[in-house]
Amino acid sequence: MKLRIQSVALAVALAVTVPVALVDAATTQGSGGPRSSLTLIVPGSAGGGYDLLAREAQQTLRSNGISGNVQVLNIPGASGTVGLQTLVEMEDRDDVLLVVGSAMVGGVEVADSTATLDDVTPISAVTTDYPVIVTPGDSPYDPTGAAEFLRAWKEDPRGHPIAGGALGNTDHLAILALAQEVGIPANDVNYLAYSGGGEVLGALLSGTAAAGVSGYAELSDQIRAGTMNGIGITAPEAVAGIDLSTFREQGIETVTSNWRGFVAPPGISADQAAELEQVVADLVRTEEWRSALERNQWQETVLTGQDYTDFIDEEVETTRRLLSGGAQ
């Protein structure tokens, strides 16, 4: 069953001109390993979730002397897969990490990328946060929970457009999972895909969308101000510091995580992978990183080794199922 989606920002840039600096980064061999210098590749633009994670890590790694020279390199394009392809071409490099997550898993599927997460070396997952579903402050539905909105959505899914981030990312997958749980066929979901949180808010405030989905950090000010109603969060249990009911607490078994972590190029040795894993382990033990978790309302989720590899495989399978319309 093919998924029909209305997308405001559907065009995926499959033909991307990579600046000379990025070509140099992919071909220049590093020396001294990750303790000497480390490049964190962000497969997206500055200001996004991946970029925030990388810059928090950069600051913490530098200030604690975990790596001597840490650089962040933004390589946006094609739902993150341009950055992924760049990393794959850095074979044998042990001084570079790519920030990945649930959005990357979906991006690979949506962009039909030739480079996949099977082509890289998993190092460590580090954080998780959860999408929040909101309705406009003047919505006719109960602002304290999801039941009324979900009933109306099920009766007329095409008449209740939902605004969120790019196709295949966590926002999109959360809506598909919620639709599946309440009995809405995936091809009836009217999902409006935007390139950023500001556009999602604009769609809600203008009446273009009946509901929206994004990370809590992007919506918290509007929820507190009453311009948006937080009707549910897709976490498995209540999240400290977030005064919203989970869908599970409301009797709706929908849990969708926005996890993020690091992978390394293919071809590195087991010892090199272990050293990169230790760099990340040193990072997440610092007080500065603890502060970053609290500041950004990230949940700590550390997975390494086979556990991390198996987790990625499970995420790929779940994402494919949701994007194909829920077929088993």
Image (spheres, helix red, strand yellow):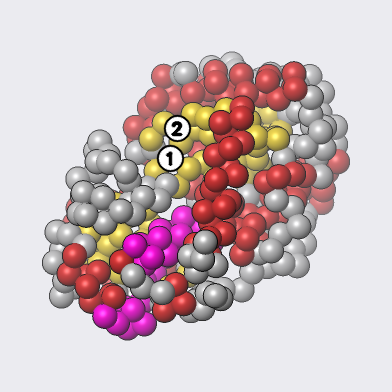
The quadrant in which residue 291 appears is top left
Q: Would you name the residue on which mark 2 appears? A: 301
The secondary structure type at the circle numbered 2 is strand
Residue 58 part of the magenta segment:
no
In front of the other: 31 or 183: 183
The residue lying at 64 percent from left, 69 percent from top is 12
Residues at discs 1 and 2 in contact (Cβ within 8 Å): yes
Point out the stretch of residues depicted in magenta: 155-181
> Label 1: few (<14), some or many (≥20) within 10 Å?
many
Is 226 on the left-hand or right-hand side of 282? left
Q: Tell me, for residue 67, which label it has, or none.
A: none
The secondary structure type at the circle numbered 1 is strand
Q: Is residue 29 above or below residue 181?
A: above
Residue 286 screen position, x and y as percent: 46, 18
Residue 190 screen position, x and y as percent: 41, 77
Q: Tell me, for residue 128, which label it has, or none.
A: 1
Is 162 on the left-hand or right-hand side of 91? left
Is 164 on the left-hand or right-hand side of 7? left
Q: Is residue 97 above or below residue 287?
A: below
Residue 7 screen position, x and y as percent: 50, 76
The residue lying at 26 percent from left, 80 percent from top is 155
The residue lying at 67 percent from left, 46 percent from top is 117
Is 12 on the left-hand or right-hand side of 272? left
Q: Earlier in the sequence, mark 1 or mark 2?
A: 1
Residue 314 screen position, x and y as percent: 55, 45
In front of the other: 171 or 119: 119
Callout 2 amino acid: Thr
Question: Rounded to the nearest whole Å, what is the CA distance between mark 1 and mark 2?
Answer: 6 Å
